Amino acid sequence: DAGVTQSPTHLIKTRGQQVTLRCSPISGHKSVSWYQQVLGQGPQFIFQYYEKEERGRGNFPDRFSARQFPNYSSELNVNALLLGDSALYLCASSLAFSLSGNTIYFGEGSWLTVV
Amino acid sequence: TQLLEQSPQFLSIQEGENLTVYCNSSSVFSSLQWYRQEPGEGPVLLVTVVTGGEVKKLKRLTFQFGDARKDSSLHITAAQPGDTGLYLCAGAIGGANNLFFGTGTRLTVIP
């Protein structure tokens, strides 16, 4: 079975531009979470979507938005890109909403460089 | 402010040596996970601990959850070059649906 898949794997954008990152969860998983990992740091939670609804949001500005589709895939959008948005964006999927008794699986990430 | 602090931040050891990585917090976690991340890849789950005082072993890796569920440790016996990577601890608080990650420990095992 395929794991969590993300696209694109690498991309370069200019300040002020917008970017869309895509994620397909493991088959059967209904929860998708997004994390940002800046070089040299641990991942930081951005969003969780479950059953197509936003269920959690980290401390990120409104320039960050996301959505989940009927097939449970998800997109992360970032508007008005800043240099500080350069990071590895990780998608994670899990069966259920709660982490209790549940395991989340990470994709390989999308490397975003803002120049 | 980082919820989980890991130490050491960097560790370089010779093949065959033992090492311990620590993950500490003032918060109580309902579960704690350890991940290893290779350059350019996403974190890969190594273990989940949920009970205070719990010890889990995965071949040469031993994981322990503190009695108060505020801290954890990862001990590697006879380290090998294949153990090289970034080790991350991550905790869940209560019924929250997100993980709080530690600052990471970058391990290099020299052949």
Image: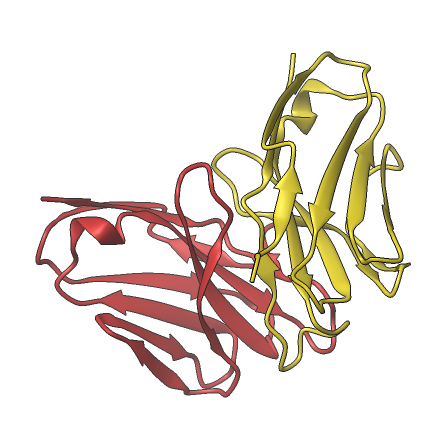
Residue B60 lies, in percent from the top left, at 21, 70
Q: Quick check: A65 above or below A79?
A: below
Name the foreground residue: B65 vs A75: A75
Name the foreground residue: A22 vs B70: A22
Report which colour depicts chain B: red
Residue A38 figure quarter: top right
- The residue sitting at 54% across, 62% down in the picture is B90
- The residue sitting at 60% across, 70% down in the picture is B27
The single residue placed furthest to the front in the displayed view is A1
The reply to whether residue B23 is in sight is yes
Report which colour depicts chain A: yellow
The reply to whether residue A60 is in sight is no
- The residue sitting at 51% across, 55% down in the picture is B102
Q: Quick check: B22 above or below A86?
A: below
Placement of the C terminus of chain B among the 4 image quadrants: top left
Residue A36 lies, in percent from the top left, at 65, 42
Residue B32 lies, in percent from the top left, at 52, 72
Q: In this view, does B42 lie to the left or right of A92?
A: left
Q: Is residue B12 left or right of residue B30?
A: left
